[in-house]
Every structure is written in structure tokens, then in C-alpha cells.
Image: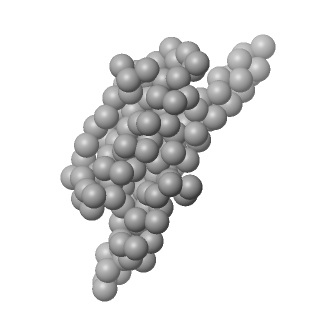
Amino acid sequence: MIKLENNIAIICSVFNSDICEKLLEGTLERLIELGVHKNQIDIVKVPGAIEIPLITKLLAKSNKYKAIISLGCVIRGETSHYDYVCEQVSQGCQQVMLEFNIPVIFGVLTTNNVRQAKKRVSKGSHKGVECADAAIEMIQLVSIISVDAND
């Protein structure tokens, strides 16, 4: 059983909703399997991946969360838009993590096609499950290192 002083936030894009909903379901199921109570999980939905960093920053600023999990799906198209979106979202999430010393788990799929995205939300290689595992591991690591740093 995981005992959290604070909650875990999940930010989930609604763009490519069929994939993103599966990411969210897998993340929630795994967190609950790991002993996190439903009432310790806050979910915020955003229009697309590009909106994830702003909401991540606002949630981190609230000091209410031990970790933030970002979920989304960006699928390559015929233009360079894909590259800009992927770079901005990943850099934005990393910036928040380093600025606020809070784990921001990057669960935004960046795939070449829908087939690849679907594969990453299937049993055995579910990115949402991996994100939940990473969040719990990082919460524990940050807690240990913070305690050691205060000694």
C-alpha cells in the first residue's frame, strides 16, 4: 500500500481520444493496483498535447501533488507540425519538473502512425502502466533523497 501525503495529478489530452483514453485507463488501473486510492488521483483533461505544459506548471505550483503524469498522443502527419509539438511538450514538461522539483512523468506518445500508437496501449507494452510505475518510483526516490539532503 502506497501512503501519499499528497495526490498524483494526471493530465490527459483529448486529441486522439481513443488512444489517450486507453492511456488514462491503464494509468489509473495500475496506480490503484499499486495501492493509490482513487481520491488521491486528480485528472485534468486538456484539448491537445501542446496544452499539457501550462497545466503541468499550474498544478506543480499548487504544491498539492507528489507527481504529475502527462498523457497524450501525437501522430506524425505530412508536415513538420509534429516535430514542433513533440519538442515543445517534452521541453515544457522537463522545465516544470526541474523548476518545481516534482516528478513529471512524460506519457505523451510520439508515433509515426496510429498502428504504433495502438501498440503502445496494448497489454504487455502499455505506456500508461509504465507511467504509473515511474510515478511511484520517482515519488519514493525524491522522498528518500529529500530526507537525506535534510540530514
Left/right of residue 137 with respect to residue 14 in the rendered view: right
Residue 147 shown left or right of residue 36 in the figure: right
Q: In which quarter of the image is the C terminus?
A: top right
Where is residue 114? Give x, y as percent. 36, 72
Residue 40 position (above or below residue 24) = above
* Residue 95 visible (yes or no): no
Q: Residue 145, relative to residue 29: is it above or below? A: above
Residue at x 55% of width, y 57% of height: 125
Q: Quadrant of residue 83?
A: bottom left
* Residue 12 visible in the picture: yes
**Colouring mode (rainbow / by chain / secondary structure / one colour):** one colour
Q: Where is residue 103 in the image (x, y as percent from the top left)?
A: 54, 37
Residue 96 rendering spot, x and y as whole percentages: 46, 42
* Front in this rendered view, residue 124 or 69: 124
Q: Which of 24 and 69 is in front in this view?
A: 24
Please give the name of the residue rendered at 49% of the width and 37% of the height, measured from the top-left corner.
Answer: 30
The residue positioned farthest toward the bottom in the image shown: 78
At x 41%, y 66%, the residue is 117
Q: Quadrant of residue 28?
A: top left
Q: Relative to the observer, which residue lies in front, 57 or 70?
A: 70
Marker count (numbered):
0
Left or right, 2 with respect to 89, comes to right
Residue 138 place in picture, x, y as percent:
62, 35
Question: Which residue is situated farthest in the front direction here?
Answer: 123
The N terminus sits in image quarter:
top right
**Residue at x 46%, y 58% (from the top left corner):** 122
Q: Quadrant of residue 145?
A: top right
